Amino acid sequence: MSLELATSANPVPDAPDSGPAAAPPGGETRVPLTPSALRAIVRDLAEQPDQWIHHVRLSTEERWYRRLDADEDHEVWLISWLPGQSTGFHDHGGSRGAFTVALGELEELSLGGPEQGLLIRRLQSGTVRAFGPEYVHDVRNTASGPAVTLHAYSPPLSSMAHYDLRAGGLVRTSEEGPEQW
């Protein structure tokens, strides 16, 4: 199987940013990177496959992931997806984020509010999504081939809550921390 980096983009509007982040515990004044800055990080990295392609692994068990970079204000992850694999609805523990589909295509589900209901976006190779700290979504591979994504979060992820979608909306079901990653 040959995977190529496609250069076409399918622009999709970003999720709204919820405004300035609260000061981190301990009185630190570090300001998280903006969704736009995170967007630039993943977009630029996707254009340099020699920096990450050799790390990609495919797993039939579950999505495969690897942290590529981490510092005090952000981290970058590489994730591979086989058909049928998904995240389920989840948040990012208050972190802002961005991701790009570097290879393949995925589908993203999110709630668009009372007037819009469930939003389903097809994310083709080259698509970049960015979001604020309150964003909840489900990303899944509904295509017939594998996909690879690059993700950046600021501040680095400290937790992720998982949700079930029910008739009344999203219901929080669990939370995980870095020890599970």
Image (tube, rainbow, N blue to C red):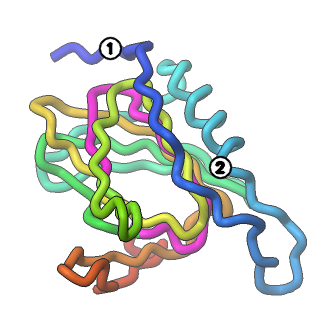
Q: CA distance from mark 2 to mark 1?
A: 27 Å
Residue at 36% over, 25% down: 125
Viewed as shown, does residue 86 lie left or right of 29? left
Q: Residue at point 59% right, 66% down?
A: 133
Determine which residue is flagged by label 1.
4
Give coordinates of residue 181: x percent, y percent. Answer: 40, 66
Q: Give 165 or 104, whichever is nearer the viewer.
A: 165
Q: Is residue 167 left or right of residue 130?
A: left
Q: Nearer the viewer, residue 81 or 178?
A: 81
Residue 24 position by quadrant: bottom right
* Neighbour tally class for label 2: few under 14, some 14-19, many 20 plus, Cα within 10 Å: many
Q: What label does residue 35 carry, if any?
A: 2
Give the amino acid at mark 1.
Glu
Q: Nearer the viewer, mark 2 or mark 1?
A: 2
What is the secondary structure assignment of the residue under circle 2? Answer: helix
Q: Specify start and end residues of the magenta stretch as a single range.
A: 91-108
**Looking at the picture, does residue 76 appear above or below residue 145?**
below
| Residue at 50 percent of width and 41 percent of height | 13
Residue 161: within the magenta?
no
Q: Position of residue 145 (x, y in %)?
A: 15, 29
Give coordinates of residue 66: x percent, y percent. 43, 49
